[in-house]
Image (cartoon, grey):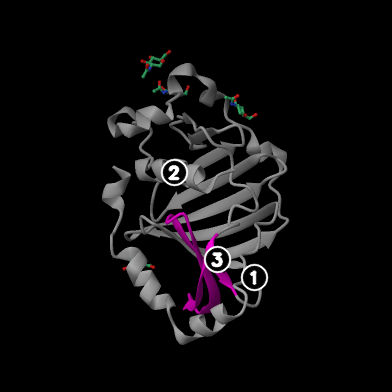
Amino acid sequence: MAVALFHPLLPLLMLSFLLSPAAATTTQHQAPTPEPWPEQFHAVLFMNYSNDLSLVDLWYDWPGGRNLHIIKDQLGGPRLFDLEWNNGTSFFYPKEEPLSCRSVQLDVGLLTPNWLDGATYLGRARVDSFLCDAWTKADFIWYYQDVDTKRPVKWVFYTGRTAHVMTYEVGAVLEDSAWQTPAYCFQKNNTTTVQQLENPEMFPFHNGLSINHNLIRQKTMFRRSLGS
Ligand SMILES: *[C@@H]1O[C@H](CO)[C@@H](O)[C@H](O)[C@H]1NC(C)=O
Ligand SMILES: *[C@@H]1O[C@H](CO)[C@@H](O)[C@H](O)[C@H]1NC(C)=O
Ligand SMILES: *[C@@H]1O[C@H](CO)[C@@H](O)[C@H](O)[C@H]1NC(C)=O
Ligand SMILES: *[C@@H]1O[C@H](CO)[C@@H](O)[C@H](O)[C@H]1NC(C)=O
């Protein structure tokens, strides 16, 4: 199913964009390597997936073994919380009525801070008005980092799902109480396994929020491909 989402021209388009003269000169020297992710940070991401727009608060907490996405669709309903633990468990829930929750067990943990190690350097490009170094990894992600500040500016998944980094606060940590999994997530029949995700009909979300199958599938593949 995920293959159907792949736009065959996407990597080509990105490559032709990147193969600028600047890229050629840079690669004559030693290819730069991407900055590791800080162990803890908060970022606000502007997401675009085929014109479905959303704002995502990303709280990455490697020492805490936890990662939280708070997703707000454009003109959408309640925010969707996507809480990921390093043991592979993810919970998806709103914090508003009607309460409901989904839990997913992945066979991989969080991305490590150095998950970009081994990425292939592509050169330089102007991205969202920043001059960036670009890398790709595992034919899965294209990653753009500001040349001067080394901050991530944008990343693009092979599906075309794109994140533009709007704020990037290194060292920011969300207070512990905000990481509390709601009690209603521990009801047995609110649990769905990743195998069931192969069949989207088996993953209904009963609270009016649409939980995006592609997003979960991509998350799983992402972590499997890029390893932890
Ligand atoms: C969102 O992405 C599409 C391509 O999928 C692009 O045509 C559109 O301009 C983008 N919209 C915004 C607001 O960035
Ligand atoms: C993983 O860790 C979280 C947070 O401590 C916990 O709620 C969840 O039940 C754990 N999952 C498994 C499979 O142990
Ligand atoms: C999940 O838990 C919520 C809260 O207890 C409940 O209202 C909902 O019906 C449960 N979901 C399913 C599929 O049973
Ligand atoms: C979940 O449990 C509730 C109450 O325990 C029950 O009414 C509901 O049918 C169950 N849902 C599923 C999908 O099994």
* 171 lies above or below 19: above
Residue 19 at x, y percent in the picture: 42, 79
Estimate the spatial distance between the alpha carbons at disc 3 and disc 1, rounded to whole Å.
14 Å
Quick one: label 3 or label 1, which is nearer the N terminus?
1
Residue at screen point 49% across, 35% down = 93
**First-in-chain label (2 vs 3):** 3
Residue 221 is tagged as: 2
Foreground mark, 1 or 2, reads 2
Q: In x, y percent, where is residue 158?
A: 38, 56
Asked whether disc 2 touches disc 3, contact meaning CB atoms under 8 Å apart, the reply is no
Q: Which mark is residue 166?
A: 3
> Looking at the picture, does residue 8 appear above or below residue 40?
below
Tell me which segment is drawn in magenta. 119-146
Question: As rendered, which of 7 and 40 lies closer to the eye?
Answer: 7
Residue under circle 1?
Answer: 150
Report which quarter residue 88 is drawn in: top right
Please, what is the three-letter code of the amino acid marked with disc 1? Lys
